[in-house]
């Protein structure tokens, strides 16, 4: 899984923090942090810092080369989808699954426009809801009726609020793309397999959530690029340790009851104390001991 996120940095002693653009419409000086996440290992595996005004799509080729990945399926969001990147991955013999932007010429909604599901190739059930699909060469178009209803409702709500760019004319033009996702792939997997693999992208989004919220590293105060690289490396190690905890909770089926923050809260007051030249383990509450027992984790 490949994706990028923005890290705010207002240091005046660096050139890499440039005025950029992000999903929050911030145009402050920032750096871009690219990450790769292994869904098999359930761990972040690679990162790279690039200038804040460099788009993810532009940095993708060098990142693929530096990461040294092989025998994998690369899954990224539509920001990485370009003919240059598709060509590069094909030449490297790397499999990929990438959604297309809705204004892509490859995103053909002709079959959706008929309104007749007999023109589609079929459906499968994902998370209890039907996902219809049809193929166009190496592009698969998926239709999620639940998503379609939500997107139509949101668009019409924006028309009612008189938001710029939202008009009934544009609604009519876009109506067949609501709820639709087109993915380009060279994996030759079934539509259901392709869709399920893509949906695992939530793993890397979860990693960014851990980085920015749990570890509170949504901005950097480093004053030079060497310090920034050190900061990113320490965060990477911290993120790996974070996932070691997360995966332990997942294996023990405790994620519904406990979070990584809960784990840290329980264990951060357990430490070694030196008494009469002997190192001893500090006391722990019964609640913490019971928690460790559920995890089958022994503090020695």
Image (cartoon, rainbow, N blue to C red):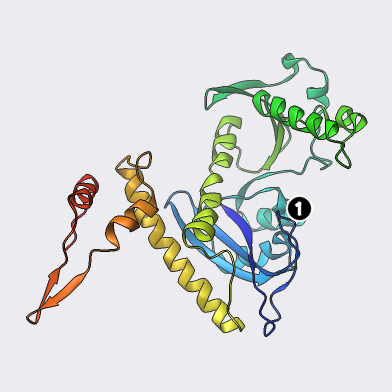
Q: Quadrant of the C terminus?
A: bottom left
Q: Residue 107 at what x, y percent from top left?
A: 79, 37
In the displayed structure, 61 sits above or below 279; it is: above
Q: Residue at x 33, y 54 (%)?
A: 263
Name, please, the residue furthest toward the right: 169
Q: Would residue 70 be visible to someone looking at this image?
A: no
Residue 167 position by quadrant: top right
Residue 125 position by quadrant: top right
Residue 299 position by quadrant: bottom left
Q: Residue 270 at what x, y percent from top left?
A: 23, 64
Label 1 sits on residue: 82
Q: Residue 273 at what x, y percent from top left?
A: 17, 74
Left or right: residue 109 compared with residue 264: right
Q: Nearer the viewer, residue 7 or 1?
A: 7
Q: Nearer the viewer, residue 205 or 60?
A: 205
Q: Residue at x 26, y 63 (%)?
A: 269
Q: Residue at x 51, y 75 (%)?
A: 231
Q: Residue 280 at what x, y percent from top left?
A: 12, 71
Q: Residue at x 69, y 39 (%)?
A: 183
User: Mark 1: which secondary structure?
Assistant: loop
Q: Would residue 171 be visible to someone looking at this image?
A: yes
In the displayed structure, 271 sits above or below 102; it is: below
Q: Nearer the viewer, residue 280 or 295?
A: 280
**Mark 1 Cα shell of 10 Å, populated few (<14), some (14-19), many (≥20):** some
């Amino acid at each position: 899984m490949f994706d990028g996120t923005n890290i705010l940095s207002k240091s005046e002693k660096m050139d890499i923090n440039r005025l950029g653009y992000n999903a929050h419409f911030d145009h402050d000086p920032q750096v871009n942090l690219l990450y790769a996440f292994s869904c098999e290992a359930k761990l972040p595996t690679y990162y790279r810092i690039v200038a804040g005004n460099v788009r993810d799509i532009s940095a993708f080729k060098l990142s693929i080369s530096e990461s040294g990945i092989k025998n994998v399926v690369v899954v990224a969001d539509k920001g990485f989808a370009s003919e240059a990147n598709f060509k590069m991955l094909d030449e490297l013999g790397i499999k990929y699954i990438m959604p297309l932007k809705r204004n892509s010429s490859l995103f053909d909604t002709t079959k959706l426009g008929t309104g007749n599901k007999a023109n589609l190739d079929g459906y499968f059930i994902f998370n209890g809801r039907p996902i219809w699909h049809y193929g166009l060469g190496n592009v698969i178009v998926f239709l999620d009726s639940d998503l379609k209803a939500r997107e139509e409702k949101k668009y019409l709500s924006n028309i009612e609020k008189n938001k710029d760019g939202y008009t009934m004319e544009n609604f009519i033009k876009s109506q067949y793309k609501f709820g639709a996702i087109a993915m380009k792939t060279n994996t030759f997997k079934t539509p259901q397999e392709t869709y399920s693999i893509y949906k695992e992208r939530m793993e890397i989004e979860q990693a960014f959530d851990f980085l920015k919220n749990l570890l509170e590293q949504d901005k950097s105060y480093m004053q030079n690029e060497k310090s920034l690289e050190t900061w990113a490396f320490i965060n990477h190690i911290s993120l790996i340790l974070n996932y070691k905890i997360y995966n332990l909770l997942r294996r023990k089926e405790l994620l519904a009851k406990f979070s990584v923050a809960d784990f840290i809260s329980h264990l951060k007051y357990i430490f070694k104390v030196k008494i009469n030249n002997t190192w001893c383990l500090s006391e722990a509450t019964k609640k913490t001991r019971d928690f460790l027992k559920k995890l089958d984790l022994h503090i020695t």
